C-alpha cells in the first residue's frame, strides 16, 4: 500500500473518532498522562509541521485553533497532509534527517506520522468512550517493526515503560502494552 493510501485509511479512522467526540468530551482525560482528548489532537497537529519543514523545507499551514475547534483543526490538517501525499511530486522530494538519514518525504510521513495517528486513535477513542478497536494487521506490523528498536524507543522519550500484558493477549493489547499504554484502563 502506498503512503498516501495508508494515510487515507488511518486518518479516516481517526477522523471518525474525532467526529464522535461529544461537544463537552474534548476535555476528557486520555490514556496519555496529563493529556485530554483535545491534547491528543493538538499533539498530532503540533509536531508534524516542524518535522516536515526541518527535513524537506515544506511549510504546512498553521492549523486552526485546537482550543476553539479541535475537529475543524484536525480535518484541515488531515486534508493538507493527504493532498501532500497525493501529489505525485512528493515522491521525488527527499526528507533529510541526521537521525534517520535521507528518505523520500512520503515514506518519512508513512514511517513516523501515520503510525502516530494510528496509535493515538486508541487514545482518543478510549478518552471519549468510543470504539477503540484498531486494525489487527496494522497492530501486528507496527509491533513487529517496533520490537527491534525497543531500547531506542524508550530512550527517545516518546514512549513510556512497557505495560505487562498476558502472553496470550491479542495483538492490539500487546502493541498498546509495548508502547506504554495500559490497555485495561477504563
Image (cartoon, rainbow, N blue to C red):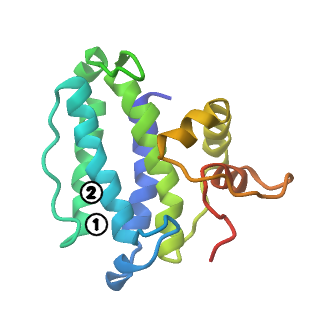
Q: Residues within 10 Å of mark 1 (few under 14, many from 20)?
A: many
Q: Which residue is mark 2?
A: 75
Q: Residue 91: x and y, percent?
A: 31, 19
Q: Residue lying at the far bottom in this picture: please name it.
A: 24
Q: Which residue is mark 1?
A: 71
Give above or below for 1 relative to 140: above
Q: Residue 104: x and y, percent?
A: 35, 18
Q: Residue 59: x and y, percent?
A: 14, 35
Residue 174 visible (yes or no): yes
Q: Quadrant of the C terminus?
A: bottom right
Residue 97: name its quadrant. top left
Residue 78 visible (yes or no): no
Give above or below for 186 relative to 62: below
Dot 2 lies on which element? helix
Dot 1 lies on which element? helix
Task: Tell me if 56 is positioned left or right of 108 in this view.
Answer: left
Q: Nearer the viewer, residue 149 or 49?
A: 149
Residue 64: name its quadrant. bottom left
Q: Is the residue under label 1 in contact with that under label 2 (CB below 8 Å)?
A: yes
Q: Residue at x 48, y 67 (%)?
A: 33
Measure the C-alpha gap from mark 2 to mark 1: 6 Å
Q: Residue at x 43, y 36 (%)?
A: 112
Amino acid at each position: 500500500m502506498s503512503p498516501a493510501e495508508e494515510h487515507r485509511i488511518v486518518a479516516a479512522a481517526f477522523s471518525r473518532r474525532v467526529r464522535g467526540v461529544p461537544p463537552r468530551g474534548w476535555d476528557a482525560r486520555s490514556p496519555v498522562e496529563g493529556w485530554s482528548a483535545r491534547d491528543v489532537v493538538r499533539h498530532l497537529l503540533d509536531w508534524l509541521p516542524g518535522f516536515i519543514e526541518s527535513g524537506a523545507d515544506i511549510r504546512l499551514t498553521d492549523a486552526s485553533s485546537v482550543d476553539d475547534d479541535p475537529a475543524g483543526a484536525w480535518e484541515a490538517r488531515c486534508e493538507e497532509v493527504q493532498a501532500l501525499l497525493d501529489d505525485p511530486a512528493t515522491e521525488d522530494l527527499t526528507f533529510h534527517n541526521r537521525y534517520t538519514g535521507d528518505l523520500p518525504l512520503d515514506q518519512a510521513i508513512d514511517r513516523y506520522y501515520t503510525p502516530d495517528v494510528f496509535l493515538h486513535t486508541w487514545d482518543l477513542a478510549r478518552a471519549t468512550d468510543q470504539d477503540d478497536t484498531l486494525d489487527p494487521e496494522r497492530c501486528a506490523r507496527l509491533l513487529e517493526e517496533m520490537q527491534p528498536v525497543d531500547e531506542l524507543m524508550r530512550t527517545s522519550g516518546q514512549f513510556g515503560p512497557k505495560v505487562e500484558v498476558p502472553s496470550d493477549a491479542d495483538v492490539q493489547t500487546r502493541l498498546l502494552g509495548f508502547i506504554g499504554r495500559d490497555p485495561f484502563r477504563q
